[in-house]
């Protein structure tokens, strides 16, 4: 039965991953955003031998959107005029096995061995699945040792997988480090438990390696040591008594060189890149502890952790109440670290931590919430009585992850009005143009009858204007239907003199049932004939076009 549940979880996550992601899309690469910085160490070292990352510009043109919308400048200039990778290199070590396997697959299958072709993109995506599931595995072993209900463990695992923002960063967004931190912190909890149970110092060696890796991924990960007293309380051990009795300084000193080898990796790479041993690679980005954004960090519509991930709030609340009932010290060992960590993280200059959903930085600490929640839901609590609430919150989370991914809501910039006006909304709002009173319509063109495009008819009938002067903007009103998210259907605006070629890819605005929308194109001055048509990129994509109305404005 245990294996069957594992297989079910793995199947659902893996199926969702491959169903949702399109590895051929320039807009949907796994190596994206901050991950471009974390990952760049590998091709720089093993393919290009280039500490200046000169290959990045070529890869941007080759594999990412031509409009430059997905460019990530991770190279920061230092005082000596040279550049270093802004991101710490620890994540590249976890990427490394998948990078090597991807290189082998690319070589066998004939894909370019440039570090960014499809096998490499897919390899980094699959790495997220592997490390997340591995993190759950070590948490499972940790919790089994406590002789807790397997049913409760699995309920909590499924709730956290599908009901928190970890789902978004597991399936949709692979640009950040938090799934990997989740794995390492789960492993950290497991090794702490092994040390307590066996009393062997060798486990402290592994604890030191894990902690060192966490620090060179994100230095703030060192804050997990604040939870060590909580982990000792879980094992019903007094931390001070245990350390006095079982900590061996001589053995620990022997381990220190290994930890130092890991911790010296960033300075070695800084030296390789810039000639400097120590730099602050984040430049002007820093903490401001005099101006924390704690309330907004937790509750704002913009990016509030508890508002966007209410399941985490409920589980934390239940856990705190349960732990304090057992003992005040037990409760404080859980509450105080979380309070301090939230204060510190909400003091970062960009407290929203960019786009995405909810507070991604809190995913790192989910192992501790999972442990506390399973402890709270002992068999007598009958967690299935909360099943309707859990199912609703899981459904809400899955929908909101979809909304953020599709642009129905804007991650990191949602207002209260936008949140509630789009609550439970599945469809992306059709684009609309507000016509200003100061605009003067100088010409109009409209389609006489409905049309369709398909494999044998790639273009709609071109609609040419008269020769016009003083046109500033062109507003095109349409009613069009096609497969949702079809990347091939585009509206093209050009001119017969070749001076203008603009296009708009409908993408996520399309649905099978035709819907109305309007688009605005700004054009340079000049006398010319404008041509408008809809194109499927010479593919077999189909679209039904019921209306095209074109208004030409001056102002």
Image (cartoon, grey):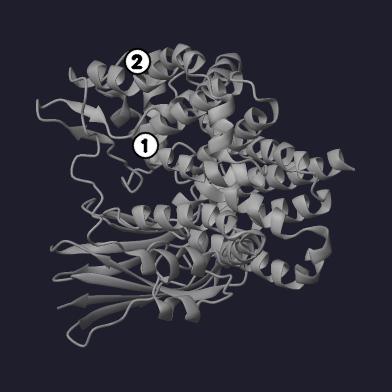
For the point 63% across and 38% down, the residue is: 135
Determine the CA span between mark 2 and mark 1. Answer: 28 Å
Quarter of the image with the C terminus in it: bottom left
- Secondary structure state at the residue bearing disc 1: helix
In the figure, is residue 128 to the left or right of 462? right
In the figure, is residue 325 to the left or right of 533? right
Where in the figure is residue 274, as x and y percent of width and height?
Answer: 19, 21
For the point 60% across and 14% down, the residue is: 108
Q: Residue furthest left?
A: 80
Where in the figure is residue 487, as x and y percent of width and height?
Answer: 51, 51
Q: Is residue 82 above or below residue 231?
A: above
In the figure, is residue 136 to the left or right of 418? right
Residue named by callout 2: 48
Quarter of the image with the N terminus in it: top right
- Res 511 visible: no
Q: Is residue 299 above or below residue 82?
A: below
Pointers 2 and 1 in contact (C-beta within 8 Å): no
Where in the figure is residue 6, as x and y percent of width and height?
Answer: 79, 41
Q: Is residue 500 above or below residue 318?
A: above
For the point 32% across and 47% down, the residue is: 67
How many numbered discs?
2
Q: Quadrant of residue 35?
A: top left
Q: Is residue 197 above or below residue 401?
A: above
Residue named by callout 1: 219
Q: Earlier in the sequence, mark 2 or mark 1?
A: 2
- Res 225 visible: yes
Where in the figure is residue 435, as x and y percent of width and height?
Answer: 28, 82
Tag nearer the camera, 2 or 1: 1
Q: Nearer the viewer, residue 407 or 440?
A: 407
Q: Is disc 2 surrounded by few (<14), some (14 to 19) or many (20+) residues within 10 Å?
A: some
- Secondary structure state at the residue bearing disc 2: helix
Q: Nearer the viewer, residue 162 or 216?
A: 216
């Amino acid at each position: 039965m245990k294996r069957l549940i594992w297989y079910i979880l793995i199947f659902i996550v893996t199926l969702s991953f491959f169903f949702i992601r399109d590895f051929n899309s320039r807009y949907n690469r796994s190596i994206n955003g901050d991950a471009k910085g974390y990952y760049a160490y590998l091709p720089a070292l093993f393919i290009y031998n280039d500490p200046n990352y000169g290959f990045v510009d070529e890869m941007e043109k080759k594999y990412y959107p031509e409009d430059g919308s997905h460019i990530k400048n991770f190279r920061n200039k230092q005082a000596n005029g040279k550049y270093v990778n802004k991101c710490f290199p620890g994540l590249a070590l976890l990427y490394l096995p998948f990078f090597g396997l991807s290189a082998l697959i690319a070589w066998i299958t004939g894909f370019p061995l440039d570090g960014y072709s499809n096998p490499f993109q897919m390899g980094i995506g699959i790495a997220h699945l592997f490390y997340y599931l591995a993190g759950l595995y070590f948490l499972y072993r940790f919790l089994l040792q406590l002789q807790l209900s397997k049913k409760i463990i699995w309920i909590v695992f499924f709730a956290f997988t599908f009901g928190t923002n970890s789902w978004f960063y597991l399936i949709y967004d692979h640009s950040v480090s938090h799934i990997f931190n989740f794995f390492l912190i789960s492993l950290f909890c497991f090794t702490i438990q092994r040390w307590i149970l066996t009393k062997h110092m060798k486990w402290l060696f592994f604890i030191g390696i894990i902690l060192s890796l966490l620090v060179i991924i994100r230095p703030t990960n060192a804050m997990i040591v604040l939870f060590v007293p909580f982990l000792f309380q879980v094992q019903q051990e007094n931390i001070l008594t245990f350390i006095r009795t079982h900590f061996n300084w001589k053995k620990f000193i022997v381990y220190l060189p290994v930890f130092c080898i890991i911790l010296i990796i960033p300075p070695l790479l800084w030296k390789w890149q810039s000639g400097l041993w120590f730099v602050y690679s984040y430049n002007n980005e820093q903490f401001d502890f005099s101006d924390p954004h704690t309330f907004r960090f937790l509750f704002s519509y913009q990016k509030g952790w508890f508002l966007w991930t209410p399941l985490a709030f409920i589980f934390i609340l239940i856990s705190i109440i349960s732990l304090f009932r057992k003992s005040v010290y037990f409760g404080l060992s859980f509450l105080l670290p979380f309070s301090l960590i939230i204060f510190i993280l909400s003091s970062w200059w960009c407290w929203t931590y960019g786009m995405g959903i909810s507070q991604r930085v809190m995913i790192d600490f989910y192992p501790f919430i999972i442990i506390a929640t399973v402890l709270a839901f002992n068999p007598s609590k009958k967690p299935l009585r909360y099943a309707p609430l859990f199912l609703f919150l899981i459904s809400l989370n899955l929908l909101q992850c979809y909304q953020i991914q599709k642009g129905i809501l804007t991650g990191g910039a949602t207002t209260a009005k936008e949140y509630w006006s789009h609550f439970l909304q599945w469809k992306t709002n059709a684009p609309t143009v507000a016509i200003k009173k100061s605009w003067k319509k100088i010409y109009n063109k409209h389609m006489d009858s409905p049309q369709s495009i398909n494999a044998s008819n790639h273009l709609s009938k071109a609609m040419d204007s008269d020769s016009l002067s003083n046109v500033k903007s062109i507003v095109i009103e349409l009613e069009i239907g096609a497969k949702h998210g079809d990347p091939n259907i585009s509206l093209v605006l050009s001119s017969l003199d070749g001076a203008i070629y603009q296009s708009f890819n409908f993408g996520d605005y399309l649905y099978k049932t035709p819907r109305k929308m309007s688009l605005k194109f700004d054009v340079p001055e000049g006398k010319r004939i404008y041509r408008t048509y809809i194109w499927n990129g010479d593919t077999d994509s189909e679209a039904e076009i019921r209306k095209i109305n074109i208004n030409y404005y001056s102002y």
